[in-house]
Amino acid sequence: VQLQASGGGLVQPGGSLRLSCAASGGTFRGYSVGWFRQAPGKERMFVAAIKWNSRISVYDDSVKGRFTISRDSAKNTVYLQMNSLGSEDTAVYYCAADSSIIHSALASQTAYDYWGQGTLVTVSS
């Protein structure tokens, strides 16, 4: 499966953006899909993940209550709705997917074999 991340851009502090991760060459059915981000000069970190079949989702503490991950089966797409954005959310956001990820590994980058190209989110006034 190939992943295409989109929706990044420049947003003011306190604003919102919605990122999309679309699958091609396959379906997300049975997969877990995660979002990770890499801020300038920092390591790539986990943001959120969702299990496609059960819709169970997990979040990093830094985004709980502000970000929501969801999926649209008709569009074979996973979304990351980001609200109350701050400068600390500036990063390149990547989506990733894989099948058969156990719940405890959803936040682990090494659990994912398929990665999108990344989309840049810049939060600045």
Image: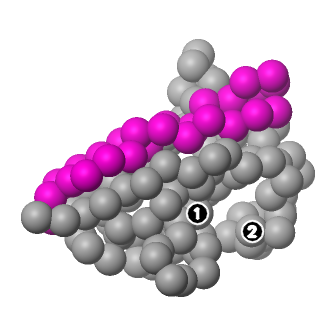
Q: Quadrant of residue 31?
A: top right
In the displayed orientation, state which residue is furthest to the left.
125
Image coords of residue 69 (percent x, y)? 48, 49
| Disc on the earlier residue, 2 or 1 | 1
- Where's the C terminus, which quadrant? bottom left
- Whether 100 is drawn above or below 76: the answer is below
Q: Residue at x 35, y 69 (%)?
A: 89
Residue for badge 2: 109
Q: Residue at x 15, y 58 (%)?
A: 12
For label 1, the SS is strand
**Looking at numbered disc 2 in the image, what kind of residue is underneath it?**
Gln
Q: Nearer the viewer, residue 116 or 105?
A: 116
Q: Residue at x 62, y 35 (%)?
A: 4
Q: Is residue 5 magenta?
A: yes
Residue segment shown in magenta: 1-27
Neighbour tally class for label 2: few under 14, some 14-19, many 20 plus, Cα within 10 Å: some
Q: Nearer the viewer, residue 25 or 65?
A: 25
- Where's the N terminus, which quadrant? top right
**Looking at numbered disc 1 in the image, what kind of residue is underneath it?**
Phe
- Whether 37 is drawn above or below 52: the answer is below
Q: Quadrant of residue 26?
A: top right
Image coords of residue 55 (percent x, y)? 61, 44
Residue 16: in sight, yes or no?
yes
- On residue 36, the disc is 1
Residue 33: in sight, yes or no?
no
C-beta proximity under 8 Å, tags 2 and 1? yes
For label 2, the SS is helix
Image coords of residue 21 (percent x, y)? 57, 38
Q: Is residue 115 magenta?
A: no
Q: Cα distance, mark 2 to mark 1? A: 8 Å
Q: Nearer the viewer, residue 119 or 79?
A: 119
